[in-house]
Amino acid sequence: MKKLTFLIIFWFPCIFIHAQTAEEYLNRGLAKDSLSDYTGAISDYNKAIELNPNDVVAYYNRGLAKDNLSDYTGAIADYNKAIEINPMFAKTYYNRGNAKNELSDYTGAISDFDKAIELNPKYAMAYYNRGVAKDELKEYTGAISDYSKAIELDPKDAMAYNNRGASKDQLGDHTGAILDFNKAIDIDTIYESTYFNRGYAKYNLSDYTGAISDYNKAIELDPKDEKAYYNRGYAKSELSDYTGAISDFDKAIELDPKDVKAYNNRGYAKVKLKNYTGAISDYNKAIDIDTMNESAYFNRGLVKYSLGDKEGACFDWSKAGTLGRSDAYDFIKKFCN
């Protein structure tokens, strides 16, 4: 009897087994997507597509899952198929544009965002991401136009204000940029990049104290932002706070030991503090990392000359001139001949 009961329990589920439909696989894939199990979701979408090769939703969502796994080429292939089945769905063009952005195909991305906007003229995020693509192509005026439209459609989009400000800064409108960064910070007080960008705009207006204040906040929000330490050090140098500058360059180098500019500028700060040996050490390191860095050769030459090493100085200036530092030849003519 026990054996019979066991057999009945063991086989009982088999009595109710049925073939799953494409819709059931699709729904299970969506459930796995919601749990961030993108690999499992793709497996279910594969099965849904196998059972229904014209399932546009399965192709679309498989593309999204591949996006989340950074398989942008695979995602684009799925979006292509979804568009082939239904060419009137704006979000598919939008997501394909985002995937192309990730692959640095900015021209292709813009074309997709154009189509998404044609299908949905109130698609704020399509304007925003088209602006991002234009930024990458250095089409700053066009980018500003797109960010402005995104802001018109969504006045609380802090990122659109931030990016519009960055584009304005690239065009030399530093004051306009700061106004946009201020607005972005009003909307979102904890977005680190906006403080960083505002600091850079203030630096461009020679407001070094204001720049340092913004870099302080950026570092508070992201203590591992190497560029914020570097830029803060640069601003401190402008205020002749060379000790503070060196401290920031130290931290930048700790976070990125290959930052040639940090070594070069730390060397400059050490020169200002008359630490010539330390300066040469930094210029040596900059040259070790980048043998084509004309500024490091030129600056090392200056220090060597001040230490009485005329031969070494003239060699460094000659190397800097060969690499494109034209004023190095003026120093050679004046001090080496």
Image (tube, rainbow, N blue to C red):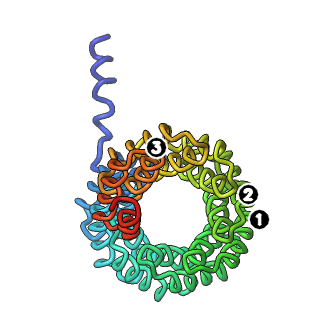
Q: Amino acid at mark 3?
A: Leu
Q: CA distance from mark 1 to mark 2?
A: 6 Å
Name the residue nearer the viewer: 123 or 332: 332
Q: Look at mark 2 in the image and give the residue it sits on.
A: 189
Q: Say whether residue 24 is visible.
A: no
Task: Say which residue appears at 38% left-offset and 76% top-offset.
Answer: 109
Q: Is residue 150 left or right of residue 284?
A: right
Rendered position, 192 above or below 103: above
* Mark earlier in primary sequence (3, 2): 2
Is label 1 in contact with label 2 (beta carbons under 8 Å)? yes
Q: Look at mark 3 in the image and give the residue it sits on.
A: 307
Task: Say which residue appears at 40% left-offset and 65% top-offset.
Answer: 334
In the rendered structure, find residue 90 and report the number of the disc placed on it: none
**Other-residue count near label 2 (Cα within 10 Å), few / some / many at <14 / 14–19 / ≥20:** few
Q: Is residue 125 left or right of residue 304?
A: right
Q: Say whether residue 68 is visible.
A: yes
Where residue 11 sits: x, y (%)?
28, 28
Is label 3 in contact with label 1 (beta carbons under 8 Å)? no
Name the residue nearer the viewer: 294 or 260: 294
Where residue 233 sits: x, y (%)?
61, 50
Q: Amino acid at mark 2?
A: Thr
Q: Residue furthest top?
A: 2
